[in-house]
Amino acid sequence: MLKKLSLISIACLASSSFAVAAAPKNIIYMIGDGMGPTYLAAYRYYMDNPQTKAVERTVFDELWIGNASTYPDDDTVVTDSAAAATALSSTHKTYNGAIAVDHDHKPLTTMLEIAKAKGMQTGVVVTAQINHATPAGFLAHDKSRQNYDQIADDYIDNKVNGQIVADLMLGGGTSYFIRKDRNLVEEFKQAGFHYTDSWAGLKTLNQLPALGLFAPKGFNSALDNPEPLPLKQMTEKALELLSPAEQGFVVMIEGSQIDWCGHANDIACAMAEMHDFAEAVKVAKAYVDAHPDTLLVVTADHETGGLSLGAAGHYSWKRDVIKKVKHTGDYIAGQLLALKDETVMYQAWLGLTGLELSADEQRLLSKARTQGQKALATAVKQRIDHHSTTGWTSGGHTAADVPVLAYGADKQVFAGFQDNTEIAGKLIQFIQQKK
């Protein structure tokens, strides 16, 4: 396990060469976990104004300039988030499950470690736990993404020239950072970090370094979360705190739970997460407009769920059905399960989904209800998919190429087709140009 990185090891990192222009001062790197191209299309139609004939473009459409392949370094073709994060942070392919290490478990230097060595400020902002696969791929080194406690330890133990890699960390994860065997929050405080575990506290954070943990693990889904647009809120605060950095900053911002909704095959959940991510992208875009020496790059680590807009041979996708759904399938199932009377249960269904069901469909729900929470949640989502003609081919990841979006200085470098390692390579070369 790597605990310290030298400038010598960092200088030897990138062997590939890309034609890049003068380095931007700041880099905002946004990753929509699981966000394949169909998610962007779905969000476009989901947000469409029905009063106009044309379908309006979203912020994603405005910035979309390329695509990327995502395969890992094995024969599966389908990557997981850990291998993808390693590729997106270090330029190196690795095996599924690896956190910034190669097949021999040797650490691979990441762009945030390089940025730290260059005197830049660094940060990660996520809606999962901050020691989840994607942020871990930028800040830690471990043979397995499942080693959550060890990865959390690495966030303070893994140093570059004696410095903690990240100046700012916002997301979930208190259960991994406050443990019986080690209280990492107290250690971060002793290292000079300002800490908060409340949304009110986030608003008053005004100095780096800072750590904000707002859930035991990942956040509640945006569709169920009483805190509106959590990723947008954290993005605003992150850019506010990082902006004064004299040497510039590099921040990775992840829409973590687009992926979780895809795994659950929950289209309403996915659209809510896409909306939070879109609003965070708008915040980043506005920052670039105000600070033209900043580069914004947006991509995904992989596609999740094999989402299709239209299913079972039907030539339609009814987004109005999805717009009426007020909560995730799991949440709706929990609410229905708590009700004993069938009539009351159906009225609750109507209130939560706005979707009228036939007598046969009501019987399907009632039968699923006797089989428990998981079966009922599946039945709920299947009814929504049926009426909206939404299709899924998998409960896992797929090998579909992912979109690449860019805005600001040198955005053209990311146009066209590329591999995910090339995105990292271009960004790393920008960082390495720093004096």
Image (cartoon, rainbow, N blue to C red):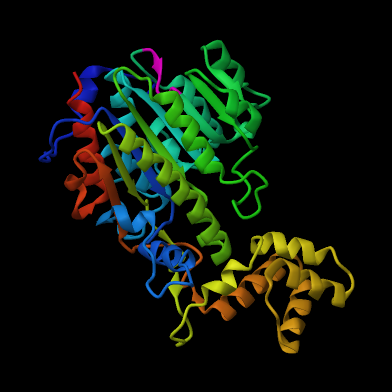
Q: How far across and how far down the image is residue 239, in percent?
A: 42, 30
Q: Nearer the viewer, residue 152 or 344?
A: 344
Residue at 37% of width from left, 40% of height from top? 286
91 relative to 368, above or below: above
Q: Quadrant of the C terminus?
A: top left
Looking at the rendering, the stretch of residues picked out in magenta corresponds to: 162-167
158 relative to 86, above or below: above
360 relative to 280, above or below: below
Residue at 47% of width from left, 48% of height from top? 279
Q: How far across and how far down the image is residue 374, in percent?
A: 69, 65
- Name the image quarter holding residue 367: bottom right
Residue 164 highlighted magenta (yes or no): yes
Q: How far across and how far down the image is residue 147, in percent?
A: 52, 37
Residue at 64% of width from left, 23% of height from top? 181
Farthest-out residue, front: 51
Q: How far across and how far down the image is residue 253, in percent?
A: 42, 39
The reply to whether residue 106 is visible in this rendering is no
> What secondary structure characterizes most of the magenta part?
loop
- Name the image quarter holding residue 381: bottom right
Is residue 165 shown left or right of residue 66? right
56 relative to 10, above or below: below
Residue at 29% of width from left, 51% of height from top? 405
